[in-house]
Image (tube, grey):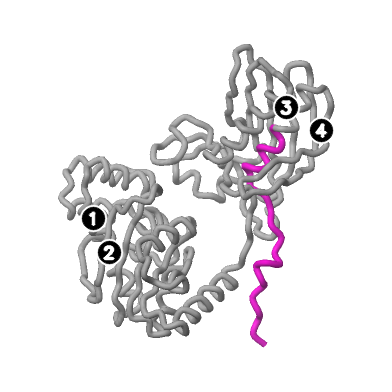
Amino acid sequence: MQKVPKDPSTLRQGYTTGACATAVTKAALLALITGERQTEATIHLPVGKDATFKIENCDYSDCIASAETIKDAGDDPDATHKALIISTVQWLDEPGIVLDGGIGVGRVTKPGLAIAVGEAAINPVPRKMIHETVQQIIDEYGVSKGIKVVISVPLGEEMAKKTLNGRLGIIGGISILGTRGTVVPFSSAAYKASIVQAISVAKAGGCDHLVLTTGGRSERYAIAQYPELKEEAFIEMGDFVGFTLKHCKRLEIKKVSLVGMMGKFSKVAQGVMMVHSKSAPINFHFLANVAKNAGASEAVIEEVEQANTASQVGDIMLRENNKTFFDLLCEACCFSSLREVKGEMELSTTIYSMKGEVLGRVDGIDTINETNWDK
């Protein structure tokens, strides 16, 4: 009997390290202000709902307090599942909020990430959550002193060995992450089944041109780019580029457009068809050769070769105003995709910036062109 994929809607959601860090910060600060130990903390999540966290331990004195919780990743356990997250807060003489990382929270050592070199690896959304929560409490209690917040994860350095942090130049621990506050689990089998169903619905609805996107943001850009297409024509393929393209080929979809951003599409361009962050590293030698073919100087080519992230490469080429680079990268995406499905399909690719600007675009490629970019 064929195993039926588990329905994602039945899987238990968990919480991000960013949500946990915000909750323990709230508990520690309330303990410091009120002189009362906290047993739970309720915070508002970016996803638009409240969540209450159990506080495992809470200690305080006149000038410093700490609180702890254990991260629950729900039915999607990752490297930080069951991590002990600690926030320590203390008074500062000068007004303001200072946020830093302690033991087990990584520190950024290379450029190209959302956090500046030298800063603790606490991503922008968790930073915002923590700052807003602290500000709300000090406003409510009329506090005029400054507050220093330090987030620690005692086993974070060991946990980080199971992540890409080392490769990205984040040293000494994990990152404090999360844009939603919640971890939404779903199995690969279930997600692939949803892709198959979406393509089938589009085919049945008469769509002969499908637009494949890697996520919600790129889908919004794609819908604006192709306003003439039906809603069913837009397929969110996530990381499963090769799988989705092959199913389009099976259902004889003749025209496919890929819409995404620099990070994942840099992998597609080099022939990687499963673009999860852990699937394969970015090939900076490949990107340097694309830059060379785009007419970049030797200095810029060397800078690309030594880059830390695909996003950083994009910033370098934007700085150089080299649109040819992005167009060539789009061409490479089309060629790699055509090789994956062995032709008989017309491909287009558009690469967007995070702000929704078109960085590169090519249309109507239906012939595989062998290049030496990856040599």
Disc 4 to disc 1, C-alpha distance? 56 Å
Q: Position of residue 270 (x, y in %)?
A: 32, 62
Mark 4 or mark 2: name the one nearer the start of the chain: 4
Q: What amino acid type should be assigned to the residue bearing mark 2?
A: Ala
Disc sitting over residue 57 in the figure? none
Do residues under tags 1 and 2 come within 8 Å of each other at their CB atoms? yes
Disc 3 to disc 1, C-alpha distance? 51 Å
- Residue at 21% across, 71% down: 369
Q: What amino acid type should be assigned to the residue bearing mark 4?
A: Gln
Mark 3 or mark 1: name the one nearer the start of the chain: 3
Disc 3 to disc 2, C-alpha distance? 52 Å
Front position in the image: 327 or 78: 327
Residue under numbered circle 3: 29
Q: Is mark 1 on a helix, strand or loop?
A: helix
* Residue 12 belongs to the span the image colors magenta: yes
- Residue at 69% across, 60% down: 75
Disc 4 to disc 2, C-alpha distance? 55 Å
Residue under numbered circle 4: 38
- Residue at 32% across, 61% down: 350
Q: Where is residue 225 in the image (x, y as percent from the top left)?
A: 35, 62
Q: What stretch is highlighted in magenta?
A: 1-25
Disc 3 crowd rating (10 Å Cα; few below 14, some 14-19, many 20+) is many
Residue under numbered circle 1: 290
Q: Is mark 4 on a helix, strand or loop?
A: loop
Q: Nearer the viewer, mark 3 or mark 1?
A: 3
Picture quarter with the C terminus: bottom left
Disc sitting over residue 332 in the figure? 2
